[in-house]
Amino acid sequence: MRQIAKSPVLAVFKMADFDPSNVNLDTTSPVDIICYLSKSSNDYNGQLGARLSAIFVILVTSGLATFFPVLASRVERLRINLYVYYFARYFGAGVIIATAFIHLLDPAYAEIGPQTCVGMTGAWADYAWCPAIVMISIMLVFLMDFGAERWVEHRYGFLHPHPNIEAVVTSRSRPNGTHDQVPAGDQDMTLQKVGNGATNRQAWTDNDEKDPENVSLAPSTERMQDRLFQQQIAAFLVLEFGVVFHSVIIGLNLGTTGEEFKTLYPVLVFHQAFEGLGIGARMSAIPFPKGVHWLPWALCLSYTLTTPIAIAVGLGLRTTYNAGSFTASVVSGVLDATSAGILIYTGLVELLARDFLFNSEPTRDSKRLTFMVACVFLGVAIMALLGKWA
């Protein structure tokens, strides 16, 4: 079925001769039927005032959700309860994972999958491109992540640390008994420096046994912060890149959709707020050096503005944009599949594996660990539910 039409031009030509009122299922090409059923025209139906309001409502709600965790970790008056922060962080992780599978992967299959007009036309019919694009995206992100980790390890040679989130967010007492305020990004931990050519943990053990005085403890705060920043920022930028792609698509759809607008509007308000909460919570734990103190605010702002700008662009194209056209389906399908791969890797590796499987700190407090896991599942469940409407 997938290789009947050999080019988009041929498919369009055949569609011109297709009579939906007189179809012989034994002789008619399945491509003609599917392309006819999936084709659409511009379905903008007015409601300009409500669509304009969506620009500002989504701007405010997503902005508040995105900026709040970052503000809470940097402004002393906004110091929050540790469990409030954990809710934002791990609820957001669940939101990111559900976004990857429900809001990106499924739409990608609906746009360029094997049972679509695109997926049954030309070169798109020769291979399973949708999962291939997802796989390529995952592998590229893996290479970027692996390369960044190796580069940082080669440059600094520190043990892989985990930040003391409690100290950063709540200013509670440190393990040494002091109660001083902890600036955002300062990590209350002791790191062991080892040679670039040695395995971290083993090198520490060997050096300790041979000559403890050769081991450098507690590197400078500035150097440690720079190391942590470079280790974490690459993974975060990849995450935001994938989310921004998705935000562009849904913004265009909200600005041009027809009768679905009434349902899509409130759903996307929550959708963008939840995603923003996840983005902001992850960013708040990154120790940004003084030289780039502006970067977290710029990253928050870029996410906050993406969807409102896309809605405005959609409104500008509201009478001409056809979301069901062949070209629009290809572009949105490729972007959705690419973003799905990015968020699948980031959600499962950077958000879950690093925090739960490779970090033993949460397992020391069963109450805290249970709360964190429950927040992840809650974020997945709510975001998956929103997928029923958007």
Image (tube, rainbow, N blue to C red):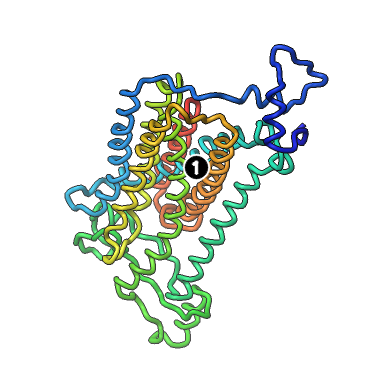
Residue at horizontal 61 percent and vertical 52 percent from the top: 136
Residue 177 relative to residue 309: left or right: left
Q: Image quarter for residue 3?
A: top right
Position of residue 72 measured from the top left corner of the image (x, y, whole percent): 25, 49
Q: Which residue is mark 1?
A: 97
Residue at horizontal 64 percent and vertical 22 percent from the top: 37
Q: Amino acid at mark 1?
A: Ile
Position of residue 124 measured from the top left corner of the image (x, y, whole percent): 69, 41
In the rendered view, would you say 189 is above or below 357? Answer: below
In the rendered view, would you say 262 is above or below 276? Answer: above
Position of residue 147 measured from the top left corner of the image (x, y, whole percent): 52, 66
Residue at horizontal 45 percent and vertical 57 percent from the top: 235
Residue 227 relative to residue 380: left or right: left
Considering every residue shown, the one lying at the far top of the view is 21
In the rendered view, would you say 20 is above or below 282? Answer: above
Residue at horizontal 44 percent and vertical 26 percent from the top: 319
Position of residue 363 measured from the top left corner of the image (x, y, whole percent): 44, 52
In the rendered view, would you say 44 is above or below 306? Answer: above
Given residues 79 and 30, the one toward you in this image is 30
Considering every residue shown, the one lying at the far right of the view is 26
> Which element type, helix, strand or loop, lies under badge 1?
helix
Given residues 213 and 348, the one toward you in this image is 348
Given residues 166 and 231, the one toward you in this image is 231
How dense is the environment of label 1, judged by Cα within 10 Å: few (below 14), some, or many (20 and up)? many
Q: Quadrant of the N terminus?
A: top right
Residue 319 relative to residue 10: left or right: left
